[in-house]
Image (tube, rainbow, N blue to C red):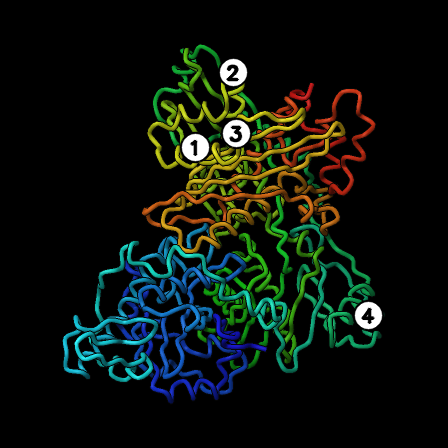
Amino acid sequence: MPTRQHGPAYGLLLPADLTAASRRRFLAGGAFLLGFAWVGQNKAWAKGEEPSLRAIRPGNADSGAAFDGFAPGGFIRIGKDNIVFIIPNTEMGQGIYTGEAMLIAEELEVGLDQITVMAAPPNEKLYAQPILKSQATGGSSSIRGAWEPLRQAGAAARTMLIGAAAQRWSVSAQECYAERGVVHCRSNGRSLPYGALIAAATKQPVPQKVPLKTPDQFKLLGRPMRRIDTPAKVNGSAQFGIDVRIEGMKIAALEICPVQGGRLAALDDSAARALPGVVDILRIGDAVAVVGDHYWAAKKGLEALKIVWNPGPGASNSSAAMWATMKQASDTGKPVVGRTVGDVDRAMKDAKSMLDAAYELPMLAHATMEPINTTVHVRPDGCEIWVGTQVPTAAQAAAAQTLGLPVEKVAIHNQLIGGGFGRRLAVDSITQAVLFAKQVSYPIKVIWSREQDTRHDHFRPAYYDRIACGLGPDGLPIAWTHRTTGASVLGDYLPTGFPEGQLDTDAVEGAVETPYDLPVVRVDWVRTKSPVKVNWWRGVGPTHNVFVVESFLDEVAHSVGRDPIEYRRALLKKNPRALGALNLVAEKSGWGSPLPPRVGRGVSLHDSFGSYLALVVEVEVTLAGTIKLRRLTAAVDCGININPNSVIAQVEGGTIFGLSAALYNGITLTGGAVDQGNFNDYRQIRIDEIPSFDTHIVPSRESPGGLGECGTVSAAPALGNAIFAATGQRLRSLPFQPALLVEKGSEKQVIAGMVGLGAVALAAAATTSKNDTEQAA
């Protein structure tokens, strides 16, 4: 049950709060609404456009007319006794409701305890993100894109409220100031709360550009603040997509053809229909859904179905065939150039020595805590959808196209998301739910089981990378080449596909630009076709490429007998921010201090998403090959940090997410079907495996950088480098295999060291990659 405020602290205004009655009460108070669309992208706010409340509120009975008050934009609403911020980005655990609310509140001169927040409805004109150029949440871009526009919205609203008060008191605006939602006059001592000024404020001219505070004037930004959404998540009132309850709603469990591209061939549903609580059996081309009065009835009905699938040509796909294709393409395929500097071939010939290596990264599932779910009610006059999505306008458009409706007839009620990581940038599951829902008259909630969620993900592509370095007399690189081979995410994501021969920048991001001074460089990409659908995964291109770059740079440093941090320093003379983060993490981690046998430290460094992050992992590798984390230390330069609590949470959470993948995760195919299905064979790191974690923030006055994915990018290379430091074994394939780390004479202990690992790790231990086997030998 939604709530506006939780005690004296912050509030989370959930969609159900805006019932027809509450909306009328809000408007009766003469509410004042202000907000600027993204600066430099559009001027929709100047036309008075405002999203319909119907697009925010589920199940409303009123007409859904647009907001009746002052409406130059869509970020701020001020009523007689309430202040509501409409947050443009989706909250999926990263704390963006708090971060973006802080940007507005800082300039509006209110505290977080005085406001409530709600999700923005689909509206590209008002909420298109300036970096992604669409209403989307991803790429660690939210704060970077909102940094100026949301502060401008708060500053403009403050200016108009002060102007209204000054006019009432017949004084100049310069004599007035605002503090905690109240306008004060220095000369006459009068004061008025914002709620008493809303009618007059609507008559003030809308300022086009207001001077913003400098960092030394900040009252909120840079201070550790509690998250707005925490109280509701603690007391259970927060509503995620899977929590949605609509009057008359039924629940559907489903099974999708195990092989992508396959179809339903035959179905015997007689036994399922006879079960109590089963309402209906629905079919679409590649899936079957059992609808029940509750989830248990739907699940038992699904188990009673007799399904025959026609897997189609995809049944011939396998992981072995995929890797063979990628390795051959790396040798014979036509590369697309990502970056070329200097004459690489000549520099390689002139090099005193050369080092090369190949790295393999598996396909990965997103494995969010909240599995895929969508609630849909298709009516003759339109459609309502309750879902957690990173792309509300894309979801709205996909549903409208599926139903043959105008987009304005489809209402998207965006919910809190229990983890996105890029999976909810895709709208396939929403289209699927609409196809089922159009067959019935009642609202239907379609819930994917954990197994369906894992096996029918749009996966992070697998990659095969070859990298080489020519060294000069001083042991530093004079030539550097990096070839990535893998599928194009844009090729699957874009409805029109992605043209052959063009560069998908995601494939080379993190390789084209590194923190280091490399004088002669060639980076290219060979495109291959993935046997399954692919999508962005947390950290996108840098998660893949930084693993390769940082692991190989570590190899190069050791090959010339140099300390890995000292070697990096020699390549960072032109990059002071990266060097600063590296020096800080070296100091705080105790780099260089003595360690016991089979214990080592590894480092990684990158600048991605506008932030600089250095990570040191300290690890112990037992005689049986078990990898035990001992200590994690991070140093981050993210520019002006909005909320230190969120900075630390994002670095720690992202790193732990990346360590799970590095230790345990990988998607494999047999007969065209995904082998993994749940956390027993797609294992996640456990709480008792996480060591002490210290995150240090570099003070900065630069514009804010992104953070949600930086820790994930850092994790695998720092861990791999630590394993090498502890054992002398260089592992070039993920996930890391304990079987390759067994101390000679301790081979029989390896099984004990692998307890709890997923099927990928067990299978890979039996048949390790050629690269790792050769290195281990």
Q: Is residue 632 left or right of residue 475?
A: right
How far across and down, in percent of the image, does residue 573 sit?
A: 35, 27
Q: Nearer the N terminus, badge 1 or badge 4?
A: 4
Residue highlighted by disc 1? 583
| Quarter residue 75 falls in | bottom left
Q: Nearer the N terminus, badge 1 or badge 3?
A: 1
How far across and down, in percent of the image, does residue 400 sit?
A: 50, 69
The disc at residue 477 is none
Residue highlighted by disc 4? 272
The disc at residue 561 is 2
Residue type, numbered disc 1: Asn
Any part of residue 537 in sight: no
Residue highlighted by disc 3? 591
State whether residue 652 is above or below residue 768: below
Q: Nearer the N terminus, badge 3 or badge 2?
A: 2
Name the foreground residue: 118 vs 181: 181
Q: CA distance from mark 1 to mark 3?
A: 10 Å
Q: Counting other residues with Cα less than 10 Å from the Cα at mark 4, is it few (<14), some (14-19), or many (20 or more)? A: many
Residue type, numbered disc 2: Gly
Q: Nearer the viewer, mark 3 or mark 4?
A: 3
